[in-house]
Every structure is written in structure tokens, then in C-alpha cells.
Amino acid sequence: MIDLRSDTVTKPTDAMRKASYEAEVGDDVYGEDPTVNKLEEKAAEILGKEAALFVTSGTQGNQIAVLTHCQPGNEIILEANAHIFLYEGAAISAFAGVQPRTIVGERGAMDPEKVESAIRTEDVHFPETGLICLENTHNKAGGAVLPLEYMKKIYQIAQSHNVPVHLDGARLFNASAATNIPVREFAAYTDTVQFCLSKGLGAPVGSIIAGSKEFIHQARKWRKRLGGGLRQAGVIAAPGLVALEEMTERLAKDHEHAKMLAEGLENIDGIIIENKVETNIVLVNVEGTPYHSESFVEMLKQEGILSGSFGPHTIRFVTHFDVSREEIKKTIEIIQKLVG
Ligand SMILES: *Cc1c(COP(=O)(O)O)cnc(C)c1O
């Protein structure tokens, strides 16, 4: 099977499994797991933040950030297709008790003027704006990179209104690989950041959230309340360290493969590439073929290629380190044969 459904399907590398086996561990709820501590210190350093916290998933990291930044009855501003809004089971409402204020963006970027005018003024009728969320790279916009200058602009607006900014950077290292800008420069225009160890970086489990010491202190309490206090978590943190040490540089290769896939597919009659491919996601529109997205996905599956339906006519392909150049070529050939 050529599995292009998501970069979450990557299996831990031999180095990760070995690191797990050899990890020094302790009870992390007591702060005594040296491997977890090392991962958190390293992640904070890479992001240029005071402190970091190892959490079970990207969703848990984002939700802890919302819970820590906000009070029930707040409003948070986020892009209309943000993962936090679309794909986290309305947890912001169910747990944090905040309401979303969504703004439709362009390639994942909300117009800064619209963001500024969405920030609430003091009025007895209004909720307070508790948080602005950005997503970089933006999943639903096809792995689009939010430019550094854009992030700076949003951060300046947020600061001038005393509203914190949280970055859902599930794929922040992809943004970094695509632009050659270190992740800490993106992180500099945020108060808090979440990134996933378990996507393109290949670790089996976990995400990091980072911010000020005080923020992480409060976030640690929220993690415990949510049942995310882990014990000998060094065995899952150790692969995360390997991910940070060995897996960030190679993301550029996944981006090359995604571009190669898009270039190969766009010449096929009836197929349109919906996104400008900047990172590891390709959105393929199949409206011009006899198939809708779900039947297309099913047909590809019969041929040994896994993909994901991403709308009635849209299919998402995600490249990652378990997919080779040859397999990308083969994918193009098979699709050519099926619909060309
Ligand atoms: C995958 C993803 C998440 C959530 O990560 P999980 O580990 O699957 O909970 C959050 N935000 C974005 C943009 C993602 O792509």
C-alpha cells in the first residue's frame, strides 16, 4: 500500500524504537522523568520560549492552550477552516466554554483588518476576546504557509489590544522547511505554540506546547485535569527527541515529492490541483472526471493507494518519509491509467 492519507501514518524509525528502549524514565507527574524533561527543554529552546510541555496530541495541546488563555464566556478569533474549529469536536465550547468567531481566510490567512475589527470593545453586551488562533501550515488550505510578515502583523494587532496569540503549528516544521526560516522566528510572533511530533516528524505519540513559564505552569494543571498527567512517559518522549534531532531537515524531501505529485497529476485530463503546493499536502479536484471524491478514493484503494476525501470533489494526498520517490511516480502512473 502507498499510504498518502496523512503524515500521521508514519511509523517510528529504528532510532526512535531504540531510544524508547534505552530511555531513562521516572514519574513525570512528580517532574521526575529525565527524558520528558529533556524533550521539554529542547523544544522550548528550539522555539525560543521559556518553557514547554509534552502533551498527548495536537488536539490536547490546542485545547490546553485555549483553556489556559481564556475564561468561560470569552470569544476566540480563528480562521473559518481552522483545525481547532473544524476538527476538535467543538472542544473549545464543550470544555473551555468559549465561542468561536470565525473569519474566512485566503490560503489560511485572515485579513488583518478583519481580525482587528473582530476584536471586541468593552460593552455590557459583548463577550471579551480571549485569544486569536493562527494555523501554520494551514491544513485545510492545503499546507499553506502563513508568511512571517503576516504573523508579525497579526501579533502586533493582538498586542495593541492585549489579546494573546496561539499558533496551531501542528506542521510548523514544514513551514520552516519550506521557507528556510527557523521555527523560533515564527514562534516569536506568538504567545504560545503547539506543534506535533507525531506527523511529519515521525514520532509515534505526542505534541509540544510552549510559552512563558507562568503559562506552562497553568497549562500543566489543565493537562492533569484532562487526564493527561503521564507517568514513565520517557518511553514516548524519547522518540520525540529523535524527531527533533533527526527528522526536521528531511521534511524538504516530502515537499519535493508533493510538488512532483502535483506536477504529474495536473497534466491529466479532468484533474485540477486546487492548492499552490508549498509543503507536503496536495489537494486534487476530480470534478472533471466521472467520479466524486469518495468513489475516487475507493478506486485508488483497489489499486493500492490510500488517500483521503476532503470535500465532494476534493482528495487530499499527504507526503511523508514512509513514501518514496518511486511510489510517487507509481501513484501518478496509476491515476493516469485510471482517468487519463
Ligand atoms: C493534526 C492536526 C492537529 C491535531 O493533532 P492530533 O495529534 O491529531 O490531535 C491540530 N491542528 C492541525 C492543523 C492538524 O493538522
Image (spheres, rainbow, N blue to C red):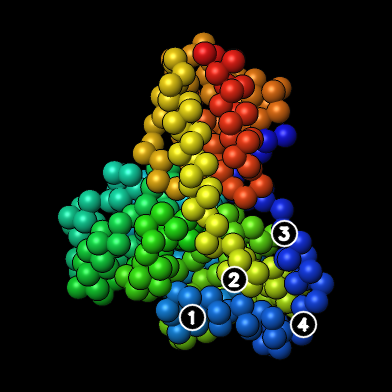
Going from N to C along the chain, the mark reached first, 4 or 2, is 4
Residue labelled with disc 2: 245
Residue closest to the eye, 247 or 239: 247
How many angstroms separate mark 4 from mark 3 (CA)?
20 Å
Q: Which label lies toward us, 4 or 2? A: 2
Could you tell me which secondary element the residue under label 3 belongs to? loop
For the residues labelled 2 and 3, the Cα–Cα distance comes to: 13 Å
Of discs 4 and 3, which sits in the foreground?
A: 3
Cβ of disc 3 within 8 Å of ligand 1? no
For label 4, the SS is: loop
Query: Label 4: which residue?
Result: 25
Q: Would residue 227 be visible to someone looking at this image? A: no
Residue count near mark 2 (Cα–Cα under 10 Å), binned few <14, some 14–19, many ≥20: few
Asked if the residues shown at circle 4 and circle 2 are in contact, with their CB atoms under 8 angstroms apart, the answer is: no
- Find disc 3 in the rendering and name its residue: 13
Q: Amino acid at mark 2?
A: Glu
**Residue at the extreme top of the image, as rendered:** 290
Mark 1 or mark 3: which comes first in sequence?
3
- Circle 2 sits in a helix, a strand or a loop, which is it? helix
Q: Which residue is mark 1?
A: 45
Judge whether 132 appears above or below 323 on screen.
below
- Kindly report the distance in space between the C-alpha atoms of the residues bearing marks 4 and 2: 19 Å
